[in-house]
């Protein structure tokens, strides 16, 4: 799993009715995009995460100009 600053980290709910927890990666602490990541979640909480199998990285879209 590799990520860059600005990507989203999504922790999927583990039980029925539990919502996904979404945050923005604000710092990559591992080498070459590897975990752990410092993540700022939607509620403003910030923490260091080492993603597990119930987590996905949504890469930010990059656009290239003319």
Image (cartoon, rainbow, N blue to C red):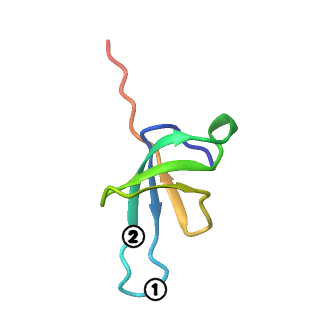
Give coordinates of residue 8: x percent, y percent.
Answer: 42, 50
Q: Is residue 60 above or below residue 13?
A: above
* Contact, mark 2 vs mark 1 (Cβ under 8 Å): no
Categorize mark 2 by other alpha carbons within 10 Å: few (<14), some (14-19), many (20+): few
In the displayed structure, would residue 16 be above or below residue 32? below
Give the residue at x 37% y 21%: 64
Quadrant the C terminus occupies: top left
Q: Which mark is residue 20?
A: 2
- Which residue shows up at 51% across the image and 40% down it? 27
The numbered disc on residue 35 is none
> Residue 63: where, in percent of width, then height?
36, 27
Q: CA distance from mark 2 to mark 1?
A: 10 Å
The residue located at (61%, 41%) in the rendering is 29
Q: What residue sits 38% from the left and 60% below the top?
A: 22
Count up the numbered dots: 2
Q: As drawn, is 40 to the left or to the right of 37?
A: left
Left/right placement of residue 20 relative to residue 2 reads: left
Residues 39 and 65: in front is 39
Measured from the top left, where is residue 55 in percent x and y? 53, 63
Q: Earlier in the sequence, mark 2 or mark 1?
A: 1
Mark 2, secondary structure of its residue? loop
Q: Quadrant of residue 41?
A: bottom left
**Residue indicated by mark 1:** 15
- Whether residue 26 is situated above or below residue 49 in the rendered picture: above
Where residue 13 sits, quadrant-wise, is bottom left
Determine the secondary structure under disc 1: loop
Label 1 packing within 10 angstroms: few (<14), some (14-19), many (20+): few
Toward the viewer: 53 or 26? 26
User: In this image, 32 relative to 18: left or right?
Assistant: right
Farthest residue, direction top: 66
| Residue 56: % across, % down | 52, 58
């Amino acid at each position: 799993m590799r990520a860059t600053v600005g990507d989203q980290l999504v922790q999927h709910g583990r039980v029925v009715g539990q919502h996904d927890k979404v945050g923005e990666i604000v710092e990559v602490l591992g080498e070459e995009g590897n975990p752990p990541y410092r993540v700022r979640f939607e509620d403003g909480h910030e923490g260091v995460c080492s993603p597990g199998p119930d987590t996905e990285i949504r890469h930010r879209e990059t656009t290239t100009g003319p």
